[in-house]
Image: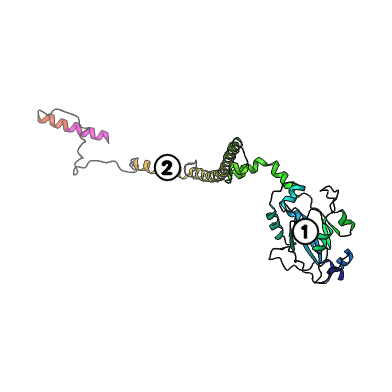
Amino acid sequence: MEELEHTCPLPRTTLTEPAIFTTETSCECQAPHEKLTVEQARLGTPVDRPVRIYADGIFDLFHSGHARALMQAKNLFPNAYLIVGVCSDDLTHKFKGFTVMTEDERYEALRHCRYVDEVLRDAPWTLTQEFLEKHKIDFVAHDDIPYSSAGSEDVYKHIKEAGMFVPTKRTEGISTSDLITRIVRDYDVYARRNLQRGYTAKELNVSYINEKKYRLQNQVDRMKEKVRTVEEKSKHFVYRVEEKSHDLIQKWEEKSREFIGNFLELFGPDGTWKQMFQERSGRMIQALSPHGSPSSSPPRDFSPSRSPSPPSRWAMPRTSPPSSPKGASASISSMSEGDEDEK
């Protein structure tokens, strides 16, 4: 339990406000500054005597690798106060090279890191004993790789020999140089992007010919994007049409089977229509056929009291009018015989 308390950092009280900038009287430690060993610092110090740790750098294009290094420095000891020194533009350009961010931008970026308690502007390139005593620094935190610069194989060599150096670990895969390499490698992409966002060719230091080339490439990319969008919409439309077509075909097949079944039921060999037709045909034949005389009917005889039906006008032979009473009686007798023969 005691070891756990020593390894856990104390809660921060300045997370809602930016870190302060160093002044000549910024040291909050009121007790006399006595030199600490690493073992003493790890055991913990009084509240009014935090371990003052110093970490310096350029911090150009401030990224997660910088933040992780400062996090390690802040958590080296249970009671730590982290001062971060940032070198100016003049000093950086002289010993290292040109920066992307200005010194004011780099100062302000460090102020908003949650692990930083204090920012020291215009930090020296090489730490002197006078500087360490002035700011009451107990330990200097940096990665353990020798940092050769300003004619020295390792600018932290004298700090290590004095027992004031505490190492941190670098974060692999991220560095300011890596970020600049990405920008240089994809220069055309970023130049085209910024031209599209409204930056002028003069601001980007782009020649007239390259500007026209980049703008043409942007137009081509926009056309490609439109074509891709149309293709995606077309694929979606075709997919929907296929779905609808499949549903329509399935419904049509169902309706077709139902229609064919109804047709066969109505007009098939044993269908309803044939039965109706046979019934109607039978009725029509029965209605049109004459009724025969019954076989048991007695023969019809003319009685003297009943005069025969007048002969049809179609069956009556054309005869000349009788010229005498004898001819008329002969004619009447011949008609009577003819009727009897018909019957």
Check the picture and name the quadrant holding the C terminus. Answer: top left
Query: In this view of the protein, can residue 112 be seen by the observer?
Result: no
Dot 2: within a 10 Å radius of its alpha carbon, few (fewer than 14), some, or many (20 or more) residues? few
Give the SS element for disc 1.
helix
- Which residue is the site of mark 1? 70
Towards the viewer: 327 or 2: 2
Residue 11 found in image quarter: bottom right
Q: Which residue appears at 68% of the width and 55% of the height?
A: 104
Percent x, y for residue 25? 75, 66
149 over 113 or under it: above or below: above
Type of secondary structure dominating the magenta stretch: helix
Q: Earlier in the sequence, mark 1 or mark 2?
A: 1
* Residue range of the region highlighted in magenta in the rendering: 332-343
Are circles 1 and 2 on residues that touch, CB within 8 Å? Answer: no
What's the residue type where badge 1 is placed? Leu
Towards the viewer: 157 or 207: 157
Dot 1: within a 10 Å radius of its alpha carbon, few (fewer than 14), some, or many (20 or more) residues? many
In the image: residue 8, left or right of residue 265: right
188 over 36 or under it: above or below: above
Residue 24 in the magenta stretch? The answer is no
What's the residue type where badge 2 is placed? Phe
Give the SS element for disc 2.
helix
Observer-side mark, 1 or 2, equals 1
Label 1 and label 2: CA atoms lie apart by 104 Å
Percent x, y for residue 281? 40, 41
In the image: residue 21, left or right of residue 40: left
Towards the viewer: 253 or 227: 227
- Which residue is the site of mark 2? 277
4 over 285 or under it: above or below: below
